Image (tube, rainbow, N blue to C red):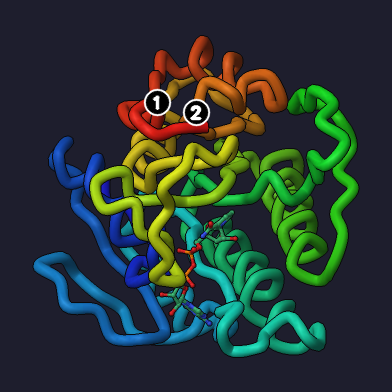
Amino acid sequence: MKVLVTGAGGYLGRGLIVPFEEHGYELRLMDVTPIESRHETVLGSVADLDTVRRALDGCQAMVIAHMASRQAAAYETPTMAFDVNVKGTANLYFAAVEQGIRRAVLVSSTGVQPYKDHNFHDRHEPMRSTGLYGLTKVCQEIIAEQYHREHGICGSALRVGCIMDGDTMIDKYGKEHTGRGMSLTDRRDIGEVARLSLECRDIGWEVFYVLGTPESRKVFDVEYTCQRLGWQPKYDFTWLPL
Ligand SMILES: NC(=O)c1ccc[n+]([C@@H]2O[C@H](COP(=O)([O-])OP(=O)(O)OC[C@H]3O[C@@H](n4cnc5c(N)ncnc54)[C@H](O)[C@@H]3O)[C@@H](O)[C@H]2O)c1
């Protein structure tokens, strides 16, 4: 199976592809900034439909992991946030239908259901984001779900927390984490759930919480992800103090 990964040069993308490589997948990596890789690469924006068509040509599945950069002040107005996150995602699903692609994974966020009240969140609860970033993540999930319902594209949204590299403990902003934040999740663990979701034969449309720490299970329905896909995080961060 050849899989397109968008945002593949980003913090998540660089770790997400590792389980796919370990399982011998053919990958095509897309990003708006150049990527050095042994895999096929496509340089261009997901906001451009023709570029997206070219990127998906010959693929059988896609993993959507791009986002407008927070560092580029992309969330001060809707313009870039919606162009990249929302229009980019709609372009990908639209082109996937044109090309008969039936499998997709969307990287979403726990931010579609803020957890500040520490209630337990299951995957059926209605989304209620705050802020422009959260709004774009909600829109992405709505697009993905509709393309499943209307066009039969099967797959999942992965609601992830604070993405981390469990070996270095340095996050995407270069900050080192020395404590066990509840929502830490290793980027390769997210890749493994994406892979398992693409391989799951009886999947229609599902939401999976993907978080690594034991504490996250008291707040989000990670247990379902484990049972449904036979997944266990390799990185649970229990070596760090709470
Ligand atoms: N980092 C976190 O802690 C975190 C938490 C929750 C959810 N997420 C989600 O994880 C995903 C990846 O985030 P990340 O942290 O790796 O972000 P990142 O900024 O490190 O990577 C995003 C990548 O997308 C690329 N990109 C930007 N605009 C593009 C465009 N127009 N066309 C193609 N590619 C484009 C960027 O160049 C970059 O390489 C996003 O969906 C994000 O919402 C991240």
The residue positioned 64% from the left and 30% from the top of the image is 206
Q: Which mark is residue 213?
A: 2
Q: Position of residue 192 (x, y in %)?
A: 34, 35
Q: Position of residue 188 (x, y in %)?
A: 32, 43
Q: Position of residue 21 (x, y in %)?
A: 17, 46
| Label 2 secondary element | loop
Q: Quadrant of residue 196?
A: top left
Tell me which amino acid carries mark 1.
Answer: Thr
Q: In front: mark 1 or mark 2?
A: 1
Is 151 left or right of 174, judged from the image as shown?
Answer: right
User: In which quadrant of the rendered image does the N terminus lie?
Assistant: top left
Tell me which amino acid carries mark 2.
Answer: Thr
Q: Quick check: 53 above or below 114?
A: below
- In the rendered image, is residue 199 in sight? no
The residue positioned 45% from the left and 32% from the top of the image is 241
Residue extending farthest top: 227
Write down the residue under mark 1: 238
Is 236 left or right of 137, judged from the image as shown?
Answer: left
- Between 51 and 35, the one lying in front of the other is 35
Q: Which mark is residue 79?
A: none
The residue positioned 48% from the left and 75% from the top of the image is 52
| Label 1 secondary element | loop
